[in-house]
């Protein structure tokens, strides 16, 4: 199987939380489903968005064959309606490598999301999560610099693409859906296309809640192309237009035509 298309979405509208940057304490006005203070669920409005997104995902061309998600509650909650629509054969692979980005801190650590076993058995027992998939990497609990975020995402994408490319079965092109977070989505766009702006604050890839961004693999890289890294899985040589796994073109950027209220929180 060869990954030919990657669709990326940011989680839908979530409940708000705050961080005290001096103490590292997270706070939300209501308890979180996982009792982890930064692992908030969707708001009622976000739940409605997730249902709108599910309809759009069910109509994507080419159809979604694989789904990868951040381990945070709001991402899995966002794709839950879409998974039901996609059918019995599509399972979710939870990967911390496409999880939330937290800025680096030398004085405190950020709470980790729930374990895979808890996600499977306690929080999302009806969601078809693959219990055997192992994440590409675990982000540092101390957070990351922006450069480290891009390195982490490039590694995660290399692992994800390679894992699907190398699976046995009929030779065919497949598409995957990734559900992630705003900063991570922007980094995904840069790592896939290889276009890293000199100003990291430049607006390039849009990250609206429950929007859809589409990347198509460049024809010259129809088969996997992976560079060498210290663990043999990643591709660090993605900048200057090269892109992870041979490079990708962005054909849809933060599209929200499927949402009644259009684009919101574009980052």
Image (cartoon, grey):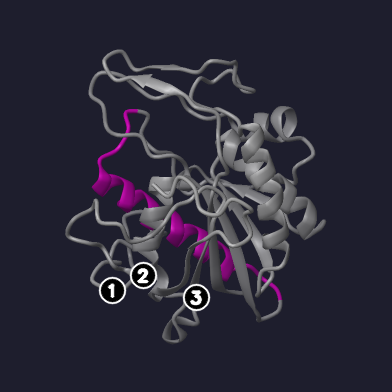
Q: Main secondary structure of the magenta part?
A: helix
Query: Is label 3 in a helix, a strand or a loop?
Result: strand
Q: CA distance from mark 2 to mark 3?
A: 10 Å
* Residue at screen point 67% across, 65% down: 64
203 horizontally vs 209: left or right:
left
In the image, which disc is placed on residue 216?
A: 3
- x, y percent for residue 94: 59, 45
> Decide: marks 2, 1 in contact (CB < 8 A)?
yes
Q: Residues within 10 Å of mark 3 (few under 14, many from 20)?
A: some
Residue 10 seen in the figure:
yes
Please tell me whether residue 223 belongs to the stretch shown in magenta: no
39 is higher (above) or lower (below) than 146: above
**The image quarter in which residue 175 lies:** bottom right
Q: Residues within 10 Å of mark 2 (few under 14, many from 20)?
A: many
26 horizontally vs 203: left or right:
right
* Residue at screen point 23% across, 24% down: 106
Q: Residues within 10 Å of mark 1 (few under 14, many from 20)?
A: some
Magenta stretch in the rendered image: 142-169
**The image quarter in which residue 56 lies:** bottom right
- x, y percent for residue 147: 24, 48
Name the image quarter holding the N terminus: bottom right
In the image, which disc is placed on residue 193?
A: 2
* Residue at screen point 44% across, 52% down: 207
204 is higher (above) or lower (below) than 51: below
Q: Furthest-front residue in view?
A: 261
In the image, which disc is placed on residue 241?
A: 1
253 horizontally vs 4: left or right:
left
Query: Is label 1 in a helix, a strand or a loop?
Result: loop
Q: CA distance from mark 1 to mark 3?
A: 14 Å
């Amino acid at each position: 199987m060869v990954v030919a298309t990657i669709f990326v979405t940011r989680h839908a509208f979530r409940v708000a939380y705050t961080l005290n940057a001096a103490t590292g304490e997270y706070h939300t006005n209501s308890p979180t489903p996982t009792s982890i203070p930064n692992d908030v669920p969707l708001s009622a409005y976000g739940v409605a968005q997730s249902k709108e997104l599910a309809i759009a995902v069910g109509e994507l061309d080419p159809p979604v064959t694989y789904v990868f998600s951040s381990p945070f509650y709001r991402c899995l909650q966002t794709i839950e309606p879409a998974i039901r629509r996609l059918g019995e054969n599509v399972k979710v692979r939870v990967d911390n490598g496409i999880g939330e980005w937290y800025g680096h801190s030398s004085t405190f650590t950020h709470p980790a999301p729930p374990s895979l076993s808890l996600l499977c058995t306690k929080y999302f027992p009806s969601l078809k999560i693959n219990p055997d998939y192992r994440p590409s990497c675990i982000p540092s609990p101390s957070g990351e610099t922006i450069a480290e975020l891009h390195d982490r995402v490039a590694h995660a994408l290399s692992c994800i693409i390679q894992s699907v490319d190398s699976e046995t079965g009929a030779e065919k092109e497949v598409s995957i859906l990734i559900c992630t977070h705003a900063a991570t989505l922007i980094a995904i766009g840069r790592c896939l296309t290889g276009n890293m702006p000199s100003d990291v604050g430049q607006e390039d890839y849009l990250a609206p809640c429950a929007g859809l961004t589409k990347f198509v693999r460049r024809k010259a890289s129809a088969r996997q192309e992976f560079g060498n890294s210290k663990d043999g899985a990643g591709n660090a040589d993605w900048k200057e237009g090269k892109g992870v796994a041979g490079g990708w073109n962005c054909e849809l950027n933060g599209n929200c035509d499927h949402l009644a209220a259009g684009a919101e929180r574009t980052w």
